[in-house]
Amino acid sequence: MKDTRNILYVARSFLWGGSVLFLAWLFFQNLVPTGEFVLQYKKGSAISPITDLHPEQRVIDLDDDGPNSQRFYVDPVYFDAKVPREFDTVTVDITFQNQAQPILELGARRLRGSWGFVMKPLQNTIIDNLDWPCQRYDGVLFCQKQERYTNLSALLVKPPSEPILTYHYALPENIQWDVMNVNTDTSEYNYLVATYTPPESLGDDWYRTSVPFVWSDFELYINEISFLVSAPELNKGHGDIVLKDITILLKRDPLDWNGFVEYIKNQLKRLKT
């Protein structure tokens, strides 16, 4: 009888101890002590940390697209990502196929209930197909139909009287400028200033690029951050967009004692709200 009780006590101890150790392991993982956390999209999986594109009415599923591929034909579409805690940077690595869409962008949701997105370029074929001479300075592209300025600084010092075409770049108030859109005719302009790096071409209209965001670009909502994929006027003869192999790299400083205390405080604040 005593032996049976002892065996039960040992079994219960192992169960309780194992449960405590498992919960402690989960808690430790949520702390992300290394400072890096990777999320990978798994199509149709209930445990995927990155959701499928939505709303479903704008997405079509074709067998020929292969695993982890999602095709949409109406703009915009959205996806969400589950995150264990706050980070400093968010980098989205994405492979996509673009048949004929001039401008394709990825946005981070900063505000809910309104159009509060921080937009970044995925691809701009208007710029990719531009045959003007261009210069690049720290990610800023400066192009001229005819080389009248030695560099962008010279243009800023003595700007032209005509409007300058821009894309994801804000010029000083004393300079006239127009923002590029899918209907822009570059023949009407002589200058372009843009913050844009073309994606890597993989062939057959497939491309890959990495889009960096900072944590302040997002509003964390129930341990989720949200994204938008924008393809303006996609349904007006620009074909479809296929997304696949979405990977999100989250980074912050490796965990130290101060970071541990900060994490505990943040969790307590969430519990109160």
Image (cartoon, rainbow, N blue to C red):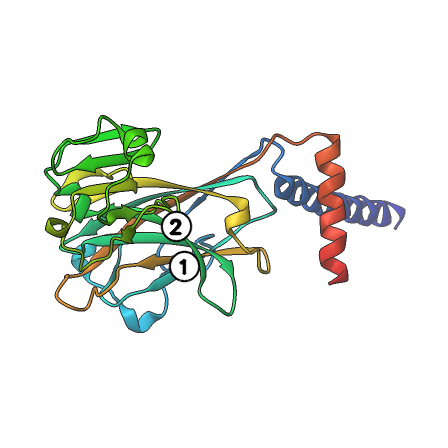
Mark linked to residue 181: none
Quarter residue 182 falls in: bottom left
Determine contact: label 2, label 1, CB under 8 Å: yes
Front-most of residues 106 and 40: 106
Q: Residues within 10 Å of mark 2 (few under 14, many from 20)?
A: many
Q: Residue visible at 76% across and 47% down?
A: 265
Where's residue 98, x and y in %?
Answer: 18, 52
Residue that mark 1 sits on: 79
**At label 1, which amino acid type do we have?**
Phe
**Label 1 crowd bin: few (<14), some (14–19), many (20+), radius 10 Å:** some
On the question of residue 68 being in view, the answer is no
- The percent coordinates of residue 255 (x first, y second) are 66, 32
Q: Secondary structure at mark 1?
A: strand
The residue under label 2 is: 41
User: 265 or 244: nearer the eye?
Assistant: 265
In the displayed structure, would residue 184 be above or below residue 247? below
Say left or right for 126 vs 215: left
Is 94 drawn above or below residue 157 in the view shown? below
The Cα atoms of the two marked residues, 2 and 1, are separated by 10 Å
Amino acid at pointer 2: Tyr
Q: Is residue 15 above or below residue 198?
A: below
